[in-house]
Amino acid sequence: MAPQLPYADFGKRLLAYLIDSVIVSAAFMILFVIVLLMVGGGALFSGNENIGDFAAALAGFGIFLFVLLFIGTIVGVWLYFAKMESSPSQATIGKRTMGIYVTDLQGQRLSFGRATGRYFSKIITNMIPLFIGWIMAAFTEKKQALHDMIAGTLVLRRG
C-alpha cells in the first residue's frame, strides 16, 4: 500500500486563496489609482470648476489606459499564479504562508504550461454554481478542486 500524500486541507487552501486575493487586489488598486491620476482623476477632487474641458480632452486617453489596466490585470494575475506555482517554491505567497504547495500527480514541480492550465481551468471551476467546483477540495480523496482534476495537480502540505 502506497503512503498517503499530505494533502492540503480545504481550510488552508481557502486561507491561502484569501491572502493571494488581498495581494492581487492591493496591486490592482495601486495600478488603478495610478491610472486614475494619469487621466486627471486627481483633478476631480481639486475643486477646479473648469474640469469639464480637461476631462473631455483626456477621455480617449483615459479609455485607452483603462483597457490597458484591464488587460494588464488579467495578465498580471495569471503570471502571479502560474510563475509562482511553477517556481522552485511551488507556491504563491498565500500558499507559502499557509505551508502548502502545488505539484503534479507524481509530486513533481509544475511546468509553467501546467501551472497556466491550472490557472485558466479555474474559469470552469468558477462556472459551477455555489462554489461547488472549489468546495470539492473538502470532500475528494486527494483534496482536489475541479481545476486540480482538470490540470492534473495536487496541493500538498509541507513537511
Image (tube, helix red, strand yellow):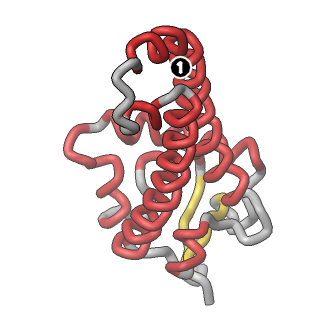
Q: Within the image, what quadrant is residue 137 found in?
A: bottom left
Left or right: residue 125 versus residue 89 is left
Three-letter amino acid code at disc 1? Answer: Gly
Residue 123 or 141: which is nearer the viewer? 123
> In the rendered image of this protein, does residue 23 appear above or below residue 39?
below
Q: Is residue 48 above or below residue 33?
A: above
Which residue is nearer to you in this view: 6 or 117?
A: 117
Q: Does any portion of residue 6 appear in the rendered image?
A: no
Residue at disc 1, secondary structure: helix
Image x and y of residue 63, in percent: 52, 16
Q: Where is residue 74 in the image (x, y as percent from the top left)?
A: 56, 35
Residue that extends furthest to the left in the rendered view of this protein:
130
Which quadrant would the N terminus be assigned to in this image? bottom right
Q: Residue under circle 1? A: 62
In the image, is 50 to the left or to the right of 108?
left
Q: Height in image: 146 above or below 91?
A: above
User: Which residue is found at the position 32% from the left and 66% from the top?
Assistant: 138
